[in-house]
Amino acid sequence: MSDKTIYENLTQLGTATALPDGPDTAVLEKVPNPQAGTLYMVRFAAPEFTSLCPITGAPDFAHLVIDYVPKDYLVESKSLKLFLGSFRNHGAFHEDCTVSIARRLVDLLEPEWLRIGGYWYPRGGIPIDVFYQTGPAPEGVWIPEQGVAPYRGRG
C-alpha cells in the first residue's frame, strides 16, 4: 500500500486548519492500518486537555490517556489533536467528555479494543477520574498501565 493510497482522503493533514468550534463539528479522520492483522497497542496522551463546566463556564482540566488496539484503521493524529482541542469551549461534565471521546473513536475506527482514562484535576476540592473501555484487552498484546498517578494534592 503506497503512502498516497493511505493519505489521499485526508483533509486536514498538511494544511492550515482552524480549531473546530466544538466536538460536534470536529472532523476525525482515519487512515488504513498498514500493519492490519498484527496486534499492537497505540497510546495518545493529552496532558493539557481542557473543557468547560456546563453550569458555571469555568475551565476544567484533565490528563487524558487513550489506548487502542487497531484493526483496519488508525486515527490520523492531527485530526485527533483538533478534535480534542475542540472541547476547549465546549461545556460538558467530566464523565460526558471522557466517554464521548471514546465512543466517537470507537464509531470511527471499530478497533479491536479501546480504553480511555480521564484524570481530571480538582474542582471544588474533588478530583474526578473517569475510565471507559470496550471490553477485555485482547490476548497477546502488551497493555501497560496508563502511568498517571492519583491526585495527591500538595503532597
Image (tube, rainbow, N blue to C red):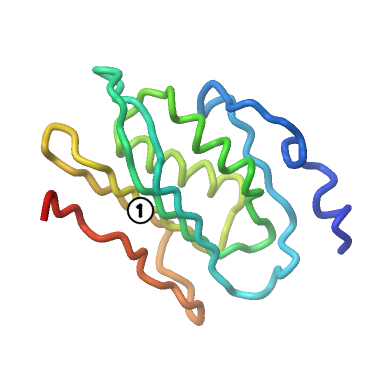
Q: Amino acid at mark 1?
A: Gly
Q: Nearer the viewer, residue 70 or 83?
A: 83
x and y percent of residue 29 in the render? 67, 42
Element at label 1 = strand
x and y percent of residue 70 in the render? 60, 62
**Residue at numbered disc 1:** 117
x and y percent of residue 10 in the render? 77, 41
x and y percent of residue 133 in the render? 40, 56
Residue at (45%, 30%) from the top-left corner? 87
Q: Nearer the viewer, residue 154 or 81?
A: 154
Residue at (11%, 56%) from the top-left corner? 155
The quarter holding residue 78 reads top right
Residue at (43%, 70%) from the top-left corner? 137
In this rendering, the answer to whether 58 lies above or below 39 is: above
Q: Residues within 10 Å of mark 1 (few under 14, many from 20)?
A: many
Badge count: 1
Q: Nearer the viewer, residue 73 or 118?
A: 118
Which residue, as the protein is rendered here, is positioned at the far bottom? 140
Instruction: Indicate the quadrant containing the N terminus: top left, top right, bottom left or bottom right.
Output: bottom right
The quarter holding residue 99 reads top left
- Left or right of 86, for residue 18: right
- Left or right of 69, for residue 117: left
The quarter holding residue 126 reads top left
- Left or right of 88, for residue 13: right
Which residue, as the protein is rendered here, is positioned at the far top? 56
In this rendering, the answer to whether 29 lies above or below 146 is: above
